[in-house]
């Protein structure tokens, strides 16, 4: 039985030579492709890093703008005598300072 199978495989070899060669090539290069894909996923390109930094800067600027508006509103109310607004203005100012001192990611 094995002899017949071997003869059949040898008889088909010329017909599938390209397929076998391609399969052998694919099997041999698969580990290299997997490692390079993993390295690509694990690293961040400079373009991606620049995009992420710009996105973070815009997020921070928007947050600081919102906080500044809130601070000005509460400071104005504080000047008119609202004690709670004075405390709120101080808390917002601390949050602004904290945001400004936090390094960009």
Image (tube, rainbow, N blue to C red):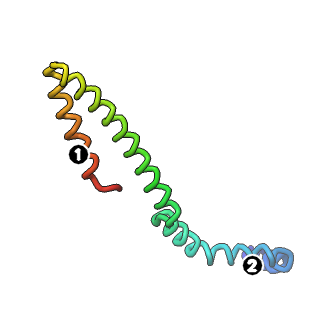
40 above or below 13?
A: above
Q: Residue furthest front?
A: 79
Q: Residues within 10 Å of mark 2 (few under 14, many from 20)?
A: few
Percent coordinates x, y for residue 69 in the rendering: 33, 32
Residue 62, picture quadrant: top left
Residue positioned 44% across, 47% down in the render: 58
Residue positioned 24% across, 25% down in the render: 76
Residue 24, picture quadrant: bottom right
Percent coordinates x, y for residue 12 in the rendering: 83, 75
How far apart are the two marked residues, 2 and 1, measured between alpha carbons? 65 Å
Question: Of 12 and 55, which appears nearest the observer?
Answer: 55
Q: Which residue is mark 1?
A: 97
Query: In the figure, is residue 21 to the left or right of 86?
Result: right
Q: Which residue is mark 2?
A: 21
Residue 21, picture quadrant: bottom right
Label 1: element kind:
helix
């Amino acid at each position: 039985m094995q002899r017949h199978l071997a003869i059949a495989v040898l008889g088909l070899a010329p017909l599938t030579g390209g397929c076998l060669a391609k399969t052998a090539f694919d099997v041999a290069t698969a580990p290299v492709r997997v490692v390079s894909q993993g390295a690509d996923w694990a690293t961040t390109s400079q373009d991606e890093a620049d995009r992420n930094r710009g996105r973070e800067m815009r997020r921070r600027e928007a947050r600081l703008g919102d906080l500044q508006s809130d601070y000005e509103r509460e400071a104005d109310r504080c000047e008119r005598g609202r004690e709670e607004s004075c405390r709120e203005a101080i808390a917002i100012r601390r949050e602004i300072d904290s945001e400004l001192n936090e390094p960009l990611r």
